[in-house]
Each structure stands twice: as C-alpha cells, then as structure tokens.
Image: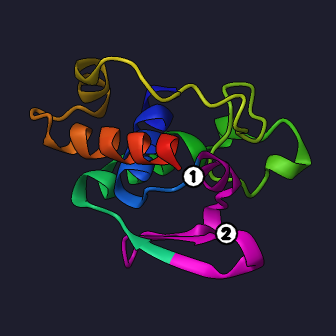
Amino acid sequence: MTVRNRAILWLLLDTGLQVSELCRLRLADVDRASATVTVRGKGGRPRTFPLSADGQRAVGAYLDQARLTPAWEPAVPEAQDRLLLTEWLHPLTRNSLFLQAGGRLTALREQLGVAGLASVKRYQHCCERRKEE
C-alpha cells in the first residue's frame, strides 16, 4: 500500500485534483509516454495535467509493482479499469482514501520521500485554498 499511497500523494500534489476526481481515475487516464494524467470533471470536459519527475516515478512504481501485476486482480468487476484500488481491491472512494486535510507537514514529506518542504507546502496551500472555497 505504500507505493499506492505515494502515487496518490504525488497525483494530488502535481495535479491539484479533487479527491472525487482522483478516485474516478482509470488506468487509461495515465499516459506514461507523455507523463500526463487526463481527468474528466463536471460536464465530462477532459483536462490534462503533466506529472513531475517525482510524480512519474511514483505512479510508474505503483503501476509496475502493484496495480498491473496478477496479484492485484480486482475483487469486483467495476474495479477492473480503475487506477486506484483499496487494499481489499475495490475501487477507491472518498471515504476510503487515507489522506485527509491536515496532519503534520513532516509526516507528509516523509511519505513522499522528499528532502525539502517546498513541495509539501504547495500541497498544504492547495488544501487550505479548497477549504476556503
């Protein structure tokens, strides 16, 4: 689950996606060749976001080590093409997502595996802005 959690954190950090958008991501939404993620928000209008080098590594590691392996066969048919699954191999939902706003910045930095706090502070700023909205 660590590799999945790291991918989630980098997807949120790199894209600024809403939790519901993150949970709806499909395997086909990730284009590893162009290092982008495409999201369909309200109205079905696609938006494409670039992934940072760290984001590419995190999502790639998740796909290679966990999601695209035979051991990660989804538990239910609707999870077959979902990018993110729970540890019980069901589609990830807002309620099952482990990351909630708040917490210590140093703990988030450690989970991401980054040395500085600059990236983490950008994420905190996005969370605070969403709370205000």
Q: Are marks 1 and 2 in contact (CB under 8 Å)?
A: yes
Residue 70 found in image quarter:
top right
Residue occupying the far right of the picture:
77
> In the shown orientation, is residue 71 left or right of residue 125?
right
Q: Relative to the observer, which residue lies in front, 26 or 93?
A: 93
Give the residue at x 33% y 53%. Answer: 55
As drawn, 125 above or below 30: above
Q: Is residue 61 visible?
A: no
**Where does residue 29 sit, x and y in percent of width and height?**
59, 69
Give the residue at x 40% y 54%. Answer: 60
Give the secondary structure at mark 2: loop
Give the secondary structure at mark 1: loop
Q: Relative to the observer, which residue lies in front, 115 or 106?
A: 106
**Where does residue 53 sit, x and y in percent of width and height?**
23, 59
| Nearer-N-terminus badge (1/2) | 1
Q: Which residue is mark 1?
A: 18
As drawn, 104 above or below 4: above
Magenta span includes 70: no
Q: In 3D space, how far apart are the residues under numbered discs 1 and 2 (Cα atoms)?
A: 9 Å
Q: For label 2, count other residues whose C-alpha is less than 10 Å away and answer few (under 14), some (14-19) or many (20+).
A: some
Q: Which region of the structure is painted magenta?
A: 19-47
Q: Relative to the observer, which residue lies in front, 75 or 123?
A: 123
Q: Is residue 133 visible?
A: yes
Q: Which residue is mark 2?
A: 41
Magenta span includes 20: yes
Give the residue at x 59% y 52%. Answer: 22
